[in-house]
Image (cartoon, rainbow, N blue to C red):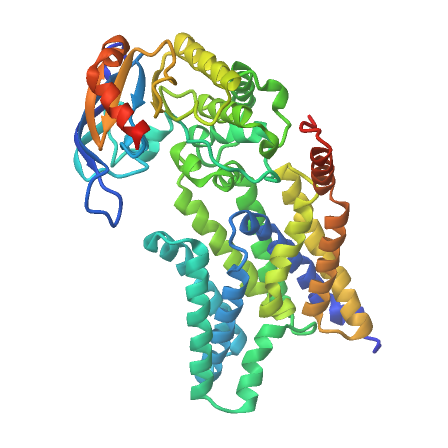
Amino acid sequence: MTQGSDLIHLDHIDTIYEGERIPVIRDISLQVKLGEFIALIGPNGAGKTTLLETINGLLPFTNGVGTVFGKNIQTHAHSIRKNIGYVIQNFELDPLAPFLCKDIVMAGRSGTIGLFRFPSKKDWEIVWESMAFVGMIDYANRPIGKLSGGEFQKILLARALAQRPKILLLDEPLSNLDVSARRQMETILNHVFDTSDISILMVSHDLQYIPSNCTRIIVLDKGHIVLDDAPESVLETESINRIFHKEQVS
Amino acid sequence: MTEIPWLFLLPSLLGAILAGFVCSSMGTFVVRMNLSSIGYCMSHAAFAGAAFGILFDIEPMLSAVLFAFATAFILGPLSEKAKLESNVIIGFLFSVMIALGFIFLYAEPGEAATGKALSILWGSLFSITYNDVLLLFVLAFALSLVIIIFYKELLSVLFHRKLAEASGINTKFFYSLVLFFTGFAVALSLKLVGGLLVFALIVNPTSTAYQFSYDFKKILLLSPLIGITSCLVGFWVSYLVDFPVGASIVIVSAVFFAVALIFSPKRRRKRLFHKEKMNGVSDLT
């Protein structure tokens, strides 16, 4: 895949949840090229997570055409996902959960390694590199349930990076973190973008949580893309204040 | 205590070791996936199966095992298709199976038939044959292979199913695989422990192992060890004081769990943490 070609190509996509009538995202057309850092912003319920999970095939779309790496999402979901790192929105984890951080990061490579194969020395090297990259190498043997919110988020990012993905989908990686943890995470994300051959789509519901290296902002509202431009253009438009002001008022 | 030659007890002894191994190994997955009630479901499926066997002149134990297998087969796909929590499906199948059991018994009235069907729910020390031991051995071997070969996928699914799916793992397959092996483990352990108590053999040793480590690999080794020890000690107690074997095994495993709760290093740290929190010290690390 060369610089400039489409990694993600969505054409008039609708995604409806099972048992619902109204699509959560409607008529979404989107092209993402290699080397883009996109912030996907919008108020709560705008369809940001749905869009991410439509891209990696976790949610099937009902209309339109969607390809990732030139492959149809619907028919090649499993193989596509092996090259997409996904960091899920922060979730509650049992403090007594019986998992060590290194095993969780290695779990990110499970799909890439494939069935009937054991992790090799090289796989473990990638795990250590990913943990070192996010500054969590000293936490390798710590129980995952004992981490703080920021540490847990870094391990989830290391898990996604251990896949050696071409696309990184991040669902609200900066929310629920204190200021210091958020700054650290932002620095790490900028560093990931600077040092890897990767495209990043990062969901945020807050205009303040947009990393400085972001190359493009897509604004979603009520399931539609309402703005899609460079950060400086998007942040200066009148409509963005209206969309976010409305949420603050409600 | 009646003196019984050890050779006569050998199949039961081997059966106890293997049943302890398969049930408590599956327990490490079942407990983590919040599927603990699967034991109830399978045992009542076995009860319905036994009643079915009595009605149609089939060996009750055979039909009991077949019903438990069938339940294990449909549980995973049904829960996927209905997009419902597995515990809801387990509850649904549990009620269907007990209703079927009563209908079959109603159609074949008589105390002998009822007693025969209910005996599936208890278990007996001397009911294990070398054929049962062989089947349990094959299951234990297959289970060990599956755990070794698919360890990374199983761990990934246990940690977070959606994340595992997102990294390219076919989680439906592994979820069904766990349910399927649990069904086998329950069905083949019925004779020894009994349907009502096999559930405890799945949950207790694993819950005990969970008290001692955060490392899933260690829990996977520790849980079957505790399961086997519970079975052997329970077996010995049953032989010594003439208690029902299933009940003895369960009481022993429950005692192990109670002791583990008291001495668990995990809980000790938790207690210390809460104590320090009360005293105003917020961070232990």
> Which quarter of the rendered picture does the N terminus of chain B lie within?
bottom right
Which residue is painted at 26% across and 47% down in the image?
A18
Q: Residue at x 51, y 70 (%)?
A: B44
Farthest residue to the front: give it: A249
- Locate the C terminus of chain B by quadrant: top right
Q: Is residue B17 visible?
A: yes
Against B49, residue A243 (above or below) is: above
x and y percentages locating residue B193 in the rendered image: 64, 67
Q: Is residue B135 above or below residue A224?
A: below
How many tags in the picture? 0
Image position, residue B130 (x, y; %): 64, 67
Residue sitting at x 43%, y 59%: B88
| Residue shown at the point (65%, 43%) measured from the top left | B219
Occupied quadrant, residue B239: bottom right
From what the image shows, is residue A238 above or below residue B68?
above
Is A3 in front, or is B7?
A3
Q: From the viewer's perspective, is B262 left or right of B144?
A: right
B274 relative position to A112: left or right = right
Q: Quadrant of residue B136?
A: bottom right
Q: Let me know if residue B5 appears in the view.
A: no
The residue closer to the viewer here, B130 or A3, is: A3
> Outermost residue toward the bottom?
B110
> Along the horizontal axis of the image, is B283 left or right of B71?
right
- Residue A158: give x, y in percent of width and height: 49, 22
Residue A210 position (above or below residue B106): above
Quarter of the rendering containing residue B117: bottom right
Q: Position of residue A40 (x, y in %)?
A: 30, 22
Q: Is residue A137 left or right of residue B35?
A: right
